[in-house]
Image (cartoon, helix red, strand yellow):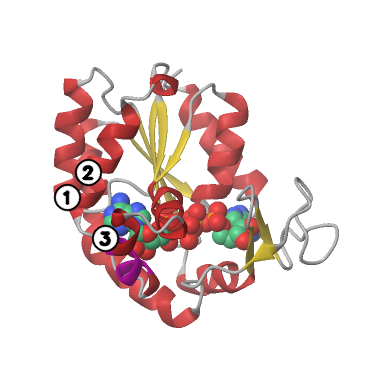
Amino acid sequence: MNILIMGPAGAGKGTMSDLIIKHYDIPHISTGDMLRENVKNNTELGQQAKAYMNTGKLVPDELINAMVEKRLLEDDCQKGYLLDGFPRTLVQAKAFEEMAERIGKPVECVLALEVGFDTLADRITGRRICSKCGAIYHLRHHPSKKEGICDECGSELTQRKDDTVEQLKVRMDEYEAKTAPIIEYFEPKGVVTRIDASKDADFTFAQVKEALGKVA
Ligand code: AP5
């Protein structure tokens, strides 16, 4: 199954992705996570991406496209992929379509998560992430059992540098201007399902399962 999951910052793409890969044997590929890993390891890509990410801006297309193509050619993508946070511009979407056709993995389903700004701000400011395994928590909606400690691996929970209301505004502007048009681009191809992601995770996941059930 070849899936794209899209939506603004805090819409729940990572949260839904964790649930999807428990049901389908495909890798979760988050360009945000890949970039953060590069920043952490101080790679050349990480050094180039860091300033854009910390201010909520998108990283240049050419850096991202090359990174994704390399990742999709890895063995674990043979049964498909769940791409989270990519494509994010029309340039990326068109390059991705060409690449996906070329390697025989055209997109089958685009999940478009929809949530309003106030809910996003609440989710972003309350989010905490495990510094080791990447598990996602929220101070109120999904707290860890022990404050500040990951239930999965016992490591410390941290807050992302871009998880402030100020950066969220920049990320939302980027999303509306550059990413939302991609959903309109894919819509006539009949692969898009719009999901009401404003309520709890179970409600969102029920819609996701229904959409994926039509493809599988
Ligand atoms: P990225 O890491 O992709 O961040 P994002 O798109 O801003 O999305 P988030 O990870 O912030 O949110 P999410 O939708 O995954 O929400 P989550 O499930 O965690 O990108 C970061 C940066 O990298 C970009 O700004 C850019 O600079 C760069 N980048 C990445 N890809 C790029 C690309 N293709 N091109 C160029 N640049 C790129 O949920 C959020 C919180 O809400 C959590 O605490 C969770 O517990 C809670 N929550 C989730 N669902 C619910 C629910 N239903 N009810 C209550 N709480 C919920």
Within-10-Å neighbours for mark 3: few <14, some 14–19, many 20+:
some
> Residue, x 27% and y 62% (percent of image)?
48
Q: The disc labelled 3 sits on which kind of residue?
A: Val
- Of the image marks 2 and 3, the number of the one nearer the N terminus: 3
Residue 140 spot, x, y in % from top left = 74, 67
Quadrant placement of the N terminus: top left
Up-down relation of residue 37 to residue 67 (above or below): below
| Dot 2: element | helix
Within-10-Å neighbours for mark 1: few <14, some 14–19, many 20+:
few
Q: Is residue 41 left or right of residue 160?
A: left
Q: CA distance from mark 2 to mark 3?
A: 10 Å
> Residue, x 29% and y 54% (percent of image)?
45
Per the image, the residue denoted by label 3 is 59
Q: The disc labelled 2 sits on which kind of residue?
A: Asn
Which residues make up the magenta segment? 48-53
Q: Is residue 34 left or right of residue 201?
A: left
Per the image, the residue denoted by label 2 is 65
Q: Is mark 3 within 8 Å of ligand 1?
A: yes
Whether residue 100 appears in this view of the structure is yes
Whether residue 198 appears in this view of the structure is no
Q: Are marks 1 and 2 in contact (CB under 8 Å)?
A: yes
Q: The disc labelled 1 sits on which kind of residue?
A: Glu
Per the image, the residue denoted by label 1 is 62
| Dot 3: element | loop
| Dot 1: element | helix
Up-down relation of residue 42 to residue 118 (above or below): above
> Residue, x 58% and y 67% (percent of image)?
123
